[in-house]
Amino acid sequence: MRFSMTRLPLAMLLATTVGACGDDAGTNDTADTSGGDTADTSDTNTGDADTSDVTITGEVEGTWAMLEVQTALVTTELLGTTTQTSKSYYLASLADGKMTVTLCDWATDDETGLTATRMGNKVLASLGPFERSYTTSEVGGAWKLSVDNGIALRGVELANPATDAMPTVDTDATVRDQDTDNHPGITLVVTGTIAGELYVAHRHQAALAGTLASDTHISGLTAWTTEQVIFGSQPALLANQKPVAVTHPDASKSHFEMFKVEAGADCAAINAARATLFADE
């Protein structure tokens, strides 16, 4: 994980300006991942930041821009097994042991450059904020952030989100046309070798374990799983690829980074500033 202290002045500068970009671009939900059926949980061990020249109080309450990078090995009929990396950009609010996150943008890219998958604005606008618990603790002279495993459902409603089986057909009563486009589930836009739309439902889970490089910068690892059910596609060849995803065995390839921003910042501000905030990604 990156704990570059040279980036902290920039983050603090953005904290005074990033909130001036207007209302939320969308009301959303938690971390997403590359398309696939099931991804295995990865390790959450993370290294310590070099904090020798920084005074850290461990105070994390406030508003944050957050990036989760999640990497999977995905097998499809056309491409075989390739590496896919998804990036989820969030607006996160931390207070009283609760982290509330709003998904501002999500995209998955294939290492071959032949395919890419995106959530459109209509999908993003249909998703709600998502809450999970967090704790901070001082361990060996370093401050740690731990965020409990949280479950996000998209395109489906389950009475017991953690344990109920995902639907397998679009006629199941639990399936929602969440983005109200007259297709079941949510619609993902695919570009590249085969372009079109996928109609899917997601159950995504993620837990975070990180280290404070300062009171305005946190980095660490993400342990995640995802289930994706495909209800159909245009063209049909997309659904026929039958993607199966597993978490990349290199745990460092699934990680997160957070920078504190001004209270009142929204998704429009996060998306506008992300190329600068997360320049190394």
Image: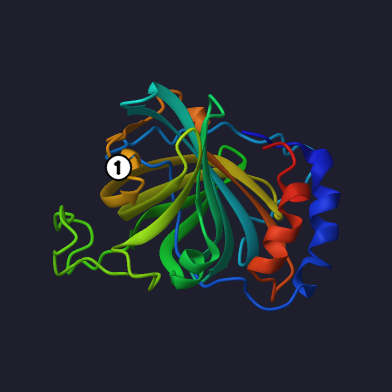
Residue in front for this viewpoint, 73 or 186: 186
Q: Compared to 233, does 37 lie above or below? A: above
Badge count: 1
Is 84 positioned to the left or the right of 271 in the image? left
Q: Quadrant of residue 280?
A: top right
Q: Quadrant location of the C terminus? A: top right
Horizontal and vertical percent position of residue 90: 57, 59
Q: Quadrant of residue 78?
A: top left
Horizontal and vertical percent position of residue 145: 53, 50
- The amino acid marked with disc number 1 is Ala
Is 88 positioned to the left or the right of 242 in the image? right
Horizontal and vertical percent position of residue 129: 46, 70
Extreme residue toward the top, this view:
80
Q: Residues within 10 Å of mark 1 (few under 14, many from 20)?
A: some
Residue at 42%, 67% (x, y): give it: 131
Q: Compared to 41, does 259 lie above or below? A: below
Q: Which residue is mark 1?
A: 239
Residue 98 shows in this picture:
no
Residue 231 shows in this picture:
yes
Residue at 51%, 50% (x, y): give it: 118
